[in-house]
Image (spheres, grey):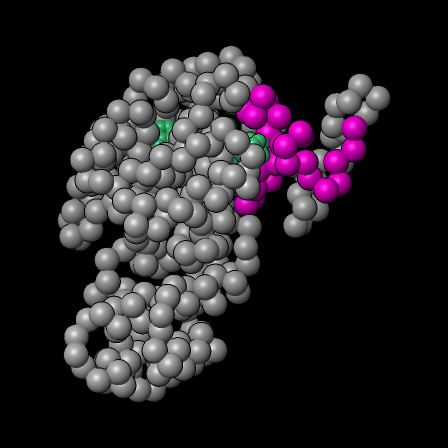
């Protein structure tokens, strides 16, 4: 991004006084990064975008353009408000079957763009653990690999995207999963003049998913994903049969125990893949005419997948 020197100075001022009070991460976001790193990322993203606009927008003098965008003081709260009020939200869908890598790569996109990842699966699991009304309704259907009702998940997302940490945008993981959900999403966004801006489709054949799903371990609080073979936690030890020792399965960041999801079984996976192909895949055709769907080959090493995601995130990829 080519920022003018004046804009760069203003950007530095904004970053150094960063008052983007990114709200504390909750169990419903998957990112592993700290709130501190978020607060320094968001201004950069906003400032960089603003710099781009400043360069191309008009024949205003550089200084005037900069003042118009960043103000003359160091009032970052007002700047935050300006972008939240006048700029479109960046609304992204991370799309793919169970095991494709949504939970692995979502937090990296979250950290890079400074927008929050919302996983309906994580939210529902939190509700099940807390034994809320929604959790009690969802528990059995989730364990069997079925889909929770559209009304419940649409209601969860409708409330969640009103939170302050969604004001610049958000990454949806595991939602929408049916055409009814995508239509409800479009409608709730249209009510504020917004729309989905990007769908990243992690493409992968079903055959490789059982190994991924059955070897997955998660840190429940953050949603961080590990794998016994492909992404083992640092503390992992194997017993004489080559199986992981339960007590050694600890989260890299907190040292807390990892767990295996009750629906990460071969039988539940068959059901999850059926609903993925039958009900979720048609969503791609719903968004394709908008030119916002970018395909990524998720059947390769994590670094290769991430490289393709980075390309897909760029505007030129459309
Ligand atoms: P999703 O959120 O799409 O269900 P995850 O990101 O949790 O999928 O990944 C499923 C499992 O596969 C995890 O154990 C993860 O560590 C592993 N995994 C993710 N991406 C890859 C990859 N490219 N190669 C090998 N294993 C992967
Ligand atoms: P995965 O990461 O393996 O794709 P998720 O964590 O997204 O799985 O979802 C786990 C389970 O939660 C799903 O199998 C389903 O029962 C329920 N669920 C999550 N999101 C939705 C949704 N948008 N609509 C219906 N059910 C959902």
Q: Which residues are magenta?
A: 211-238
Image coordinates of residue 97 in percent, x first then y, are 42, 26
Residue 59 lies in the magenta-colored region: no
The quadrant of the image that shows the N terminus is: bottom left
Residue 74 sits in quarter? bottom left
**Residue 271, quarter of the rendered image:** top left
Give how far across and how far down residue 255 sits, in percent.
Answer: 70, 46
Name the quadrant where ligand 2 sits.
Answer: top left
Numbered marks: total: 0
Pick the quarter of the image with the C terminus: top left
280 vs 65: above or below: above
Query: On the picture, is 167 further left or further right than 85?
Result: right
| Residue 247 vs residue 113, the one in the foreground | 113
- Quick check: 203 left or right of 294? right
Query: Position of 214 compared to 186: left or right?
Result: right
Q: Is residue 220 magenta?
A: yes
**Residue 19 x %, y %:** 42, 73
Residue 317 found in image quarter = top left
Question: From the viewer's perspective, is residue 270 above or below residue 239?
Answer: above
Going 66% across and 49% down the picture, which residue do you hit?
254
Q: Please tell me which residue is depicted at 42% across the width and 18% down the height of the picture.
A: 273
Query: Which residue corresponds to the image point at 67% horizontal and 30% vertical from the top-left?
Result: 228
158 shown above or below 7: above
Residue in the image at 41% along x and 29% along y = 203
Q: How far across and how far down the image is residue 267, in percent?
A: 51, 12
Please say whether residue 218 is visible from this viewpoint. Answer: no
Magenta portion: prevailing SS class: loop
């Amino acid at each position: 991004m080519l920022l003018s020197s004046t804009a760069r100075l203003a950007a530095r001022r904004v970053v150094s006084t960063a008052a983007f009070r990114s709200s504390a991460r909750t169990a419903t976001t998957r990112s592993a990064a700290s709130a501190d790193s978020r607060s320094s990322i968001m201004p950069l993203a906003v400032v960089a975008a603003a710099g781009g606009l400043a360069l191309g927008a008009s024949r205003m003098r550089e200084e005037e353009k900069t003042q118009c965008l960043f103000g003359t003081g160091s009032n970052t709260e007002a700047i935050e408000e300006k972008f939240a009020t006048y700029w479109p939200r960046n609304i992204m869908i991370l799309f793919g079957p169970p095991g494709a890598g949504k939970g692995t790569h979502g937090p990296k996109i979250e950290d890079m763009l400074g927008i929050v990842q919302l996983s309906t699966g994580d939210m529902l699991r939190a509700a099940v653990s807390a034994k809320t009304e929604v959790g009690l309704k969802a528990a059995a259907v989730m364990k069997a690999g079925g889909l929770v009702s559209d009304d419940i998940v649409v209601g969860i997302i409708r409330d969640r995207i009103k939170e302050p940490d969604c004001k610049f945008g958000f990454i949806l993981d595991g939602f929408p999963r049916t055409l009814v959900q995508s239509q409800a999403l479009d409608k709730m966004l249209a009510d504020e003049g917004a729309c989905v801006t990007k769908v990243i489709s992690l493409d992968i054949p079903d055959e490789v998913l059982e190994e991924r799903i059955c070897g997955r371990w998660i840190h429940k609080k953050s949603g961080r994903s590990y794998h016994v073979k492909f992404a083992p936690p640092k503390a992992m030890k194997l017993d004489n049969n080559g199986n992981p020792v339960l007590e050694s399965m600890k989260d890299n960041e907190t040292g807390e125990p990892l767990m295996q999801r009750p629906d990460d079984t071969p039988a539940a996976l068959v059901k999850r893949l059926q609903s993925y192909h039958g009900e979720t895949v048609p969503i791609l055709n719903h968004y394709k005419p908008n030119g916002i769907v970018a395909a990524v080959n998720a059947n390769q090493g994590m670094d290769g997948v991430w490289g393709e995601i980075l390309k897909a995130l760029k505007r030129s990829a459309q």
